[in-house]
Image (spheres, helix red, strand yellow):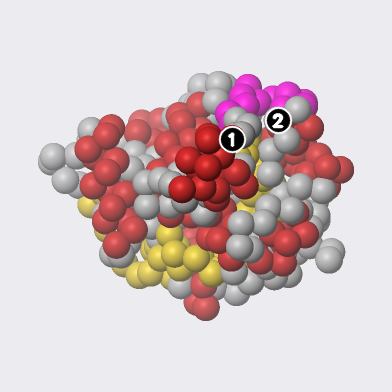
């Protein structure tokens, strides 16, 4: 209770057992994310998921003990300089206890030094570049999102076979380059014959596709183009250029549902995904799927699950501290902390604060009732199945 109580008012409060309210405060969570820009669709999912996660973990009260959770939104507009400024404002002007975000890896990399400067936690979700919990990491950074190595190791399970030649197509920024670097490191048997990097907003893939075809068409054995792409543009247009005439297949990792519409024409394609709503079997995912369908008339998507994991992690960490939100106490609580999510159990690895989590090897099927290709589970890859490298300099 913020108002002063005197005389009979104080006595009434005491009589009603309300004195606990005097100590109540706001716990401020800043979500600094790509609310506008090329990754807006991803960012909206994360925001929805974050709120659902906070709600689920607090049993609908949005409180921890007597303290109220307040979510502050700040739009980085998909620009690194804006992301840096917005995080600084969240820490200094909003006095945020903890921050979450952003969507794009280049924005995340700009934000990491800000967390270190203000000595406050940035919980990275869903930016994926390895360098975030690698060589650019600092002790104030935690990540519930998967990293490029987790993506790469999982995809290598599906594609890494003797006699296979692979050419890669990715965007020319941190997400694409870190992702392909990790993918190459994870591949132990297949041969990478070409890497194609195109601008993030590429609309015409013809020239890039021709270079990919030329790199593979004369190779013996199985030939695959592995696509790693996020946001605008449709790299699967290269299928219209008929790579099959050279015996070339297309492979890709999981993505948001709209981005998997082209997958419906690629029945049998294998890859790995971070999340698909029909795969995990646990009570939290059951709740997420049911609630998301009820509220948004659609199933939860790729980044909704990640946002929910971030929300749950925040609540569980603060519960673990007994309600304390000072940074050093939170870091101590979060290092090595395990928590349940729509994907099952995650654990923040103490060495780099990366969440160890399951990934899913899939094979695409077509469902006439769904617009997208359905990733059917081949195998769940649990954290102990993946040797995810520690890449920071702690």
Residue at numbered disc 1: 7
Q: Position of residue 132 (x, y in %)?
A: 71, 51
- The verdict on residue 69 being magenta is yes
Assign a secondary structure to mark 2: loop
Q: Position of residue 317 (x, y in %)?
A: 59, 60
Residue located at (60% from left, 44% from top): 22
Disc number for residue 94: 2
Q: CA distance from mark 2 to mark 1?
A: 34 Å
Residue 14 shows in the view: yes
Q: Position of residue 353 (x, y in %)?
A: 68, 62
Q: Decide if residue 293 is on the left or right side of residue 207.
A: left
Image vertical order of residue 19 relative to residue 28, above or below: below
- The verdict on residue 11 being magenta is no
The reply to whether dot 2 and dot 1 touch (C-beta < 8 Å) is no
Q: Residue 313 appears in which quarter of the rendering? A: bottom right
Residue located at (55% from left, 25% from top): 35
Q: Residue furthest front?
A: 7
Assign a secondary structure to mark 1: helix
The N terminus, quarter of image: top right
Q: Nearer the viewer, residue 228 or 66?
A: 66
Q: Which portion, as a residue range, is magenta?
A: 68-87
Residue located at (23% from left, 33% from top): 297
Q: Decide if residue 258 is on the left or right side of residue 4.
A: left
Q: Position of residue 25 (x, y in %)?
A: 61, 42
Residue 262 shows in the view: no
| Marks 2 and 1, the one that precedes in the sequence | 1
Q: Nearer the viewer, residue 134 or 16?
A: 16
């Amino acid at each position: 209770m913020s108002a002063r109580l005197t005389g009979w008012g104080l006595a009434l409060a005491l009589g009603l057992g309300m004195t606990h309210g005097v100590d109540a405060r706001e716990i401020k969570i800043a979500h600094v994310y790509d609310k506008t820009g090329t990754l807006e669709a991803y960012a909206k999912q994360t925001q929805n998921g974050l709120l659902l996660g906070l709600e689920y973990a607090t049993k609908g009260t949005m409180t921890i003990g007597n303290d109220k959770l307040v979510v502050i939104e700040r739009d980085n507009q998909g620009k690194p300089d804006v992301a840096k400024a917005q995080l600084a404002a969240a820490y200094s002007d909003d006095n945020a206890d903890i921050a979450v975000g952003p969507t794009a890896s280049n924005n995340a990399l700009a934000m990491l030094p800000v967390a270190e400067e203000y000595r406050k936690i940035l919980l990275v979700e869903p930016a994926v570049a390895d360098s975030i919990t690698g060589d650019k990491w600092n002790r104030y950074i935690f990540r519930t999102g998967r990293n490029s190595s987790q993506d790469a190791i999982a995809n290598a399970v599906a594609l890494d076979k003797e006699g296979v030649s692979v050419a890669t197509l990715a965007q020319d920024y941190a997400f694409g380059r870190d992702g392909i670097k990790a993918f190459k490191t994870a591949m132990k048997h297949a041969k990478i014959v070409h890497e194609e990097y195109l601008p993030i907003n590429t609309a015409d893939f013809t020239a890039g596709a021709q270079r990919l075809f030329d790199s593979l068409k004369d190779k013996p054995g199985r030939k695959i183009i592995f696509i790693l792409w996020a946001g605008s543009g449709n790299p699967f247009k290269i299928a219209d250029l008929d790579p099959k005439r050279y015996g070339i297949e297309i492979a890709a990792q999981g993505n948001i549902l709209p981005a998997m519409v082209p997958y419906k024409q690629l029945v049998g394609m294998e890859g790995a995904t971070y999340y698909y709503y029909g795969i995990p079997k646990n009570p939290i995912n059951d709740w997420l799927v049911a609630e998301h369908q009820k509220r948004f008339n659609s199933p939860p998507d790729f980044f909704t699950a990640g946002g929910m994991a971030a929300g749950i992690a925040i609540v569980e960490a603060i519960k673990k501290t007994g309600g304390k939100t000072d940074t050093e106490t939170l870091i101590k609580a979060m290092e090595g902390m395990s928590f349940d999510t729509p994907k099952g159990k995650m654990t923040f690895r103490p060495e780099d604060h990366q969440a160890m989590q399951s990934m899913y090897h899939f094979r695409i099927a077509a469902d006439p009732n769904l617009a997208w290709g359905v990733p059917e589970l081949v195998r769940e890859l649990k954290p102990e199945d993946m040797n995810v490298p520690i890449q920071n300099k702690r």
